[in-house]
Image (spheres, rainbow, N blue to C red):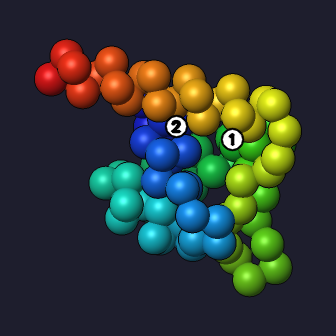
Amino acid sequence: MRRARVLAAMTHDGQTAYRIARTAGLKDAAVAGVLDQLSRINVAVQDIHGRWLLCRGSHVENALHEARELLATAEVGA
């Protein structure tokens, strides 16, 4: 669920981890862990200014799609 919230918060490229955490409503440490995980699987990358960008490719589109579905399902169940 945290990964889905982070991906949903990354709708605009070039955000800092702090901004993503605020948008996702998560603690900084949780977001840092998710961003590290996303960078290891080539879904997100950090630029030289410390801003996070989504990579390109079908694997990224699949991750975003799965995140949207998970969040929509959680919203319906709430």
User: Which image quadrant is residue 14 in?
Assistant: bottom right
Q: Which residue shows up at 47% across the image and 70% down it?
A: 18
In the rendered structure, the answer to whether residue 37 lies left or right of residue 77 reads right
- For the residues labelled 2 and 1, say whether their Cβ atoms are less than 8 Å apart: yes
Whichever of callouts 2 and 1 sits on the residue coming sooner in the sequence is 2
Residue 61, image x, y percentages: 70, 34
Secondary structure of the residue carrying numbered label 2: helix
Quadrant showing the N terminus: top left
Q: Nearer the viewer, residue 5 or 27?
A: 5
Residue 4, image x, y percentages: 48, 35
The disc labelled 1 sits on which kind of residue?
A: Gln
Q: Which residue shows up at 54% across the image and 45% down it?
A: 7
Q: Nearer the viewer, residue 65 or 41?
A: 65
Residue 16, image x, y percentages: 57, 72
In the rendered structure, the answer to whether residue 42 lies left or right of residue 24 reads right
Q: Is residue 38 above or below residue 58?
A: below
Q: Residues within 10 Å of mark 1 (few under 14, many from 20)?
A: some
Q: How much space separates mark 2 and mark 1, taking CA atoms?
A: 9 Å
User: Which image quadrant is residue 74 in?
Assistant: top left
Q: Which residue shows up at 51% across the image and 30% down it?
A: 67
Q: Which residue shows up at 79% across the image and 30% down it?
A: 59
Which residue is tagged 2? 3
The disc labelled 2 sits on which kind of residue?
A: Arg
Q: Nearer the viewer, residue 3 or 77?
A: 77
Q: Is residue 37 above or below residue 50?
A: above
Which residue is tagged 1? 37
Secondary structure of the residue carrying numbered label 1: helix
